[in-house]
Amino acid sequence: MREPPPLRDGRQEMPADTVEAIYDTLWATSEIPTRAPEGIERVMLAEDKLYVVLAVVLIIWFGLIFFLLRTDRRLDTLERELEDRIPEDHTPA
Amino acid sequence: MPTLTERFTKGGSPGVNVERYRTIRTVVLVAVTAVAVGGFLIEIPRIQILEHTARNLYFHVPMWFTLMAAVAVSAYHSLRFLQTGDLRRDVRAREAALVGVVFGILGLLTGMVWARFTWYQGTNIWWNFDPKQSMAAVQLLIYGAYLVLRTAFDEPQKRGRIAAVYNLFALVTVPFLLFILPRQAPSLHPGADGNPAFSDFTAPSMRWVLYPAFASFIGLFWVIYTQRVRAAFLKLRLHGDTD
């Protein structure tokens, strides 16, 4: 097993040409885990980790839905309150 | 008898322009949909460890830009409240902060999931007190405290003033907690010491989705915020109180 090259103190010098060059300096020589993924990783690492993106999008979607439902509840309360204040004879039949 | 909208826009006070709201809402909903579709379909360069999760850039990063936009809007209305004493400014400040915190929570959760399957792959770690994540969590607590602080006062003007002053101080912490401090710490997050920052590694093709994503999610904030402001103004008229 090869040790990754030691990092110097402070900022890394960054060859700014390509994406590959940047990542090669950091990771090309380090060990990539080869152990078979277990549990949740078996799902999330499949398809080149595409399901991680799906999970992130779903978190945002469900978070916004939850918040929208709370706004809905506030409108329900307001509607009930307004109805209480409208005089009887103005209520449509 | 002035209409509801006229009453609220009289003398330049901050009412809701419903016509403008409807136009922007439609544009924003189409744009967010386009970003979601483009985020999955447009080709991206493959990078080890990141692989397809690089696409999270389109969804995770805009959450934080939206939080920053939201708290800036909130602080602006807090400042205007201190100048005018108009409770509708206080309502706007609260709603902007609340919606901002929701986006911040989503930013933190999406960041956790992203980190779990890249930084912490094979280790079963969900949270490792990475400085960037910890500072972001502290930032959310600061704004959570703003919302809690408001509940401590019964008198609307007093509540508005104290909350507004707190809100202005809270805004000052944002650049420190989200950028300056984490960048000086040994964080795994891009932009931290020893890590390439966003502009160093984002391929040009990704910017076609990323920049519209920033605009779309900030627009989505604006839509939700305006919707809540409309409801809160009704409540203000019914009760004469903001909270």
Image (tube, coloured by chain):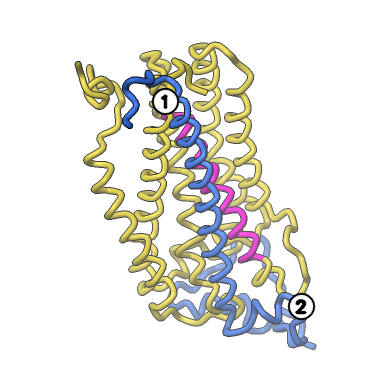
Chain colours: A blue, B yellow
Residue nearer the viewer, A31 or B44: B44
Q: From the image, state whether disc 2 or disc 1 is nearer to you.
A: 1
As shown in the figure, which amino acid type bears the numbered disc 2? Gly
Residue at x 60%, y 41% (from the top left corner): B140
For the question of whether residue B75 can be seen, the reply is no
Would you say residue B96 sits in the magenta stretch? yes
Residue at x 54%, y 45% (from the top left corner): B102
Task: Count neighbours of disc 1 (C-alpha within 10 A) and say few if under 14, some if 14 to 19, many if 20 or more.
Answer: few
Q: What element carries label 2?
A: loop
Judge from the rendering whether residue B193 lies leftward or rightward of residue B29; answer left or right. Answer: right
Residue at x 48%, y 45% (from the top left corner): B67
Tell me whether marks 2 and 1 sit on the same chain: yes
Q: What stretch is highlighted in magenta?
A: B91-115
Q: Position of residue A15 (x, y in %)?
A: 49, 74
- Quadrant of residue A58 within the rendered picture: bottom right
Judge from the rendering whether residue B150 lies leftward or rightward of residue A19; answer left or right. Answer: right
Q: Position of residue A66 (x, y in %)?
A: 55, 50
Pick the quarter of the image with the N terminus of chain A.
bottom right
Residue at x 56%, y 40% (from the top left corner): B176
Q: Where is residue B214 in the image (x, y as percent from the top left)?
A: 39, 56
Judge from the rendering whether residue B61 lies leftward or rightward of residue A55; answer left or right. Answer: left
Tell me which secondary structure the magenta stretch mostly adopts.
helix
Pick the quarter of the image with the C terminus of chain A.
top left
For the question of whether residue B189 can be seen, the reply is yes
Q: Mark 1 points at which residue?
A: A82
As shown in the figure, which amino acid type bears the numbered disc 1? Leu
Answer with mark 2 or mark 1, whichever residue precedes in sequence. 2
Q: Is mark 1 on a helix, strand or loop?
A: helix
Q: Residue furthest left?
A: B1
Q: Mark 2 points at which residue?
A: A39
Compared to residue A23, the image places residue B97 above or below, namely above
Image mark 2: chain? A
